[in-house]
Image: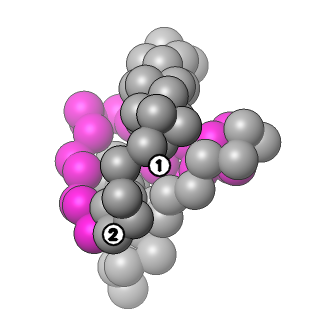
């Protein structure tokens, strides 16, 4: 697993919802906090062999993060 701290102001739950619409899976950091902490963090799985599809999904996730930050 990779733990990624996004810039302050990122909303990992909203990012998860948007990413899911494009079949990109991630876990928002708030799932791992009893006090709704880590709102700007995500957990990504990295256990599968690297593929061009994963590279494209990661690139797209970066674009979604950028759009998420523009919305704040």
Q: Residue at x 43, y 25 (%)?
A: 59
Instruction: Give 54 or 15, whichever is nearer the viewer.
Output: 54
Q: Residues within 10 Å of mark 2 (few under 14, many from 20)?
A: few
Q: Residue furthest bottom?
A: 34
Counting residues from the start of the chain, the first of labels 1 and 2 encountered is 1
Percent across and percent down for residue 70 are 48, 14
Instruction: Give 32 or 26, whichever is nearer the viewer.
Output: 26
Percent across and percent down for residue 27 are 48, 64
Q: Which residue is mark 1?
A: 12
Percent across and percent down for residue 33 are 35, 79
Q: Which residues are magenta?
A: 1-20
Numbered-mark total:
2
**Rendering quarter of residue 48:** bottom left
Q: Residue at x 38, y 85 (%)?
A: 34
**Colouring mode (rainbow / by chain / secondary structure / one colour):** one colour
Instruction: Give 60 or 18, whichever is nearer the viewer.
Output: 60
In this rendering, is residue 70 above or below 51?
Answer: above
Q: Residue at x 63, y 41 (%)?
A: 19
Q: Nearer the viewer, mark 1 or mark 2?
A: 2
Kind of element beneath mark 2? loop
Q: Is residue 26 visible?
A: yes
Q: Report whether 69 appears left or right of 24.
A: left
The N terminus lies in which quarter of the figure?
bottom left
Q: Which residue is mark 2?
A: 47
């Amino acid at each position: 697993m990779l733990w990624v701290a996004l810039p302050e102001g990122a909303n990992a739950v909203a990012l998860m919802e948007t990413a899911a619409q494009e079949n990109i899976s991630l876990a928002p950091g708030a799932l791992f906090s009893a006090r709704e902490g880590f709102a700007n963090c995500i957990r990504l799985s990295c256990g599968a062999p690297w593929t061009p599809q994963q590279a494209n999904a990661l690139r797209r996730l970066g674009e979604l993060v950028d759009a998420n930050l523009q919305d704040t």
